[in-house]
Amino acid sequence: MKPTRRSPAASLAALVLALTVLSGCAGAGGSAGKGGPGAGLDDPAKKDIAMQLVSSAENSTLDWKAQYDYIEDIGDGRGYTAGIIGFCSATGDMLGVVERYAKARPGNALERFLPALRAVKGTDAHTGLGRPFTQAWSKAAGDAAFRAAQDTVRDREYFEPAVAQAKKDGLGTLGQFVYYDAYVMHGAGDTEGTVGFRTMRRQARAEDRPPAEGGDEGAYLGAFLDARVEAIGKEPSHSDTSRVETAQRVFLREGNFGLEPPLRWTVYGDSYLIKGPDAS
């Protein structure tokens, strides 16, 4: 990526930048980039769009609310993958969901699998789990407390930290989603065989500055997506980059920094559409 040059600092621009830094946050829709004023990804309507976009990649459907009962081993070395964003038995976030559910609903059918989930963390093993566990997971999806446990782990471990960091970097709604999707797929930090969000962000910042540091939002997001494609190429369990190249990169090329529908994209060869508010 071509580095972004800082233009000569005019006194007014310097004052505005100083006030932005002193405020400590971008504020509601106050991105210094091209996202402009408007709802961020934590707006309920925008968050639902984000959930649909992630679901298209994780579950091949826009109906993310129907995925609480989903569970299978997809052979990626992460054990079972399940639920609304693909919680995994190997990474520990599946364990977090079941622990939270146990607190909300003591004695539930999944609680007895907690020792096994703790034992298989970090591996792709099914020891002590198997069909009894997968059946209990799917059945638990009928309980609002279990669905709430998935929502909470998603928000606390992925959505909230991703959106918060994006706002600190001065990114609009699209950039907030770009960060969130990277968190979902790669996690925050590096692990064996994976490159995490923090490394991608560091690589992107080495190429282009984010808006909060005076950079151009489009150039910075391009650099971040480049870093993510490179990261996917380093993961043995992943090779397809369509959730970046024919989805997020499409929105970026269109200049849709507000992530405004209609949205058209392709993931793993399947095409999707989120209609605009005026569509019949």
Image (cartoon, rainbow, N blue to C red):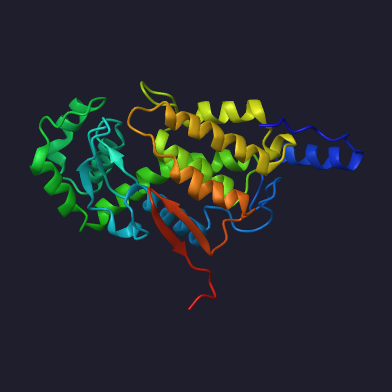
x 34%, y 60%: residue: 63
Q: Is residue 46 above or below residue 115?
A: below
Quadrant of image for the N terminus: top right
x 70%, y 40%: residue: 211
In terms of image quadrants, where is residue 114? top left
Q: Is residue 87 left or right of residue 161?
A: left
In this view of the protein, which residue sits in the foreground, 3 or 141? 3
Residue 21 in the image: state x and y as whole percent: 73, 37
Q: Is residue 107 visible?
A: no
Residue 37 in the image: state x and y as whole percent: 68, 56
Residue at the extreme front:
269
Q: Is residue 15 visible?
A: yes
Q: Is residue 157 above or below residue 260?
A: above
Residue 152 in the image: state x and y as whole percent: 36, 47
Q: Is residue 119 left or right of residue 238?
A: left
x 9%, y 42%: residue: 131
In this view of the protein, which residue sits in the foreground, 247 or 31? 247
In this view of the protein, which residue sits in the foreground, 186 or 74? 74
In terms of image quadrants, where is residue 196? top left
x 52%, y 41%: residue: 179
Q: Is residue 39 left or right of residue 216?
A: left
Residue at the extreme top:
192
